[in-house]
């Protein structure tokens, strides 16, 4: 694939991911819903799987995580450092889980396998993203990481992955339906569209940062 086209694909999907984390995630948090679990189950899995279906390029999900995580840093709601680290980790973990799958996803032809893969993906993306955040956040913040603190909350982390896993089992088969759609755009439409949508995402988040 053209590297330029891939770069702009990473930019737009990563920006949309970052916007959803900043805006929709903040709404979930404000009303007391389990933000991280809902975001992984519905939005993270959707963005990452769609990118895998249409671009079929290794490293793309890590790139999307870097874009989304950077954008999340500009949202002052909640622990933006923790969220940014989690987002970047989620992109990398997805790459590892899906590393052996073919890019045409022929291994996921049956609904049972799709549901199973959705459950596995959402579960491990969530819990390992959570664990990495608990390790790196205090190190980067300068407060220091203590293994005892992580061990104490491990049962909670392991249990909390069940909810996003159940959502992922529903979301993945649904997202795979887009394989039947031709969403390709000619370059003269693709580049202005990706640039425009990405700009809007960053404008909304950074604008909110200045106004808050």
Image: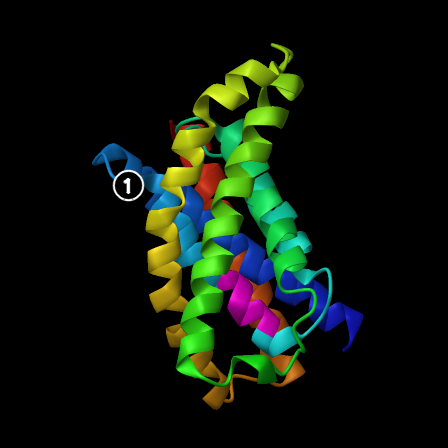
Q: Is residue 175 visible?
A: no
- Residue 134: % across, % down: 55, 26
Whether the magenta-drawn stretch holds residue 60 is answered as no
Q: Residue at x 34, y 38 (%)?
A: 26
Q: Residue at x 60, y 56 (%)?
A: 94
Magenta-drawn segment: 47-52
Q: Is residue 65 visible?
A: yes
Which quadrant of the view contains residue 193? bottom right
Q: Is residue 187 above or below residue 16?
A: below
Q: From the viewer's side, name the closer residue of 19 and 105.
A: 105
> Label 1 neighbourhood size at 10 Å, few (<14), some (14-19), many (20+)?
some
Mark count: 1
Q: Is residue 6 above or below residue 72?
A: below
- Residue 9: % across, % down: 63, 67
Locate the N terminus and report the quarter of the image it occupies: bottom right
Which quadrant of the view contains residue 43? bottom left
Most common secondary structure along the magenta stretch: helix
- Residue 185: % across, % down: 58, 84
Q: Residue at x 59, y 77 (%)?
A: 54
Which element type, helix, strand or loop, lies under badge 1?
Answer: helix
Q: Is residue 208 above or below residue 55?
A: above
Q: Is residue 199 above or below residue 135?
A: below
Whether the magenta-drawn stretch holds residue 49 is answered as yes
Q: State how the image is colored.
A: rainbow
Q: Which residue is mark 1?
A: 27
Q: From the viewer's side, name the closer residue of 163 and 144.
A: 163
Q: From the viewer's side, name the closer residue of 131 and 20.
A: 131
| Horizontal arrangement in the rendering, residue 123 relative to residue 57 (left or right) | left
Report the residue that reaches farthest toward the left.
Answer: 31
Which quadrant of the view contains residue 138? top right
Locate the C terminus and report the quarter of the image it occupies: top left
Q: Residue at x 41, y 45 (%)?
A: 161
């Amino acid at each position: 694939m053209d590297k330029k086209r891939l770069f702009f694909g990473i930019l737009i999907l990563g920006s949309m991911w970052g916007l959803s984390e900043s805006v929709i995630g903040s709404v979930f948090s404000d009303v007391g819903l389990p933000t991280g679990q809902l975001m992984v189950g519905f939005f993270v899995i959707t963005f990452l799987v769609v990118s895998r279906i249409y671009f079929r390029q290794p490293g793309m999900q890590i790139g999307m995580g870097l874009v989304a995580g950077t954008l999340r840093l500009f949202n002052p709601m909640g622990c933006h450092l923790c969220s940014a680290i989690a987002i970047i980790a989620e992109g990398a973990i997805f790459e590892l889980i899906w590393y052996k799958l073919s890019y045409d996803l022929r291994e996921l032809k049956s609904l049972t396998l799709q549901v199973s893969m959705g459950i596995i993906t959402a579960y491990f993306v969530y819990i390992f993203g959570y664990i990495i955040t608990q390790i790196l956040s205090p190190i980067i913040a300068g407060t220091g990481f203590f293994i005892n603190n992580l061990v104490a909350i491990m049962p909670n982390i392991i249990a909390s992955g069940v909810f996003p896993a159940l959502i992922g089992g529903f979301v993945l088969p649904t997202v795979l339906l887009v394989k039947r759609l031709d969403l390709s755009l000619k370059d003269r439409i693709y580049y202005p569209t990706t640039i425009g949508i990405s700009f809007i995402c960053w404008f909304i988040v950074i604008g909110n940062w200045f106004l808050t």
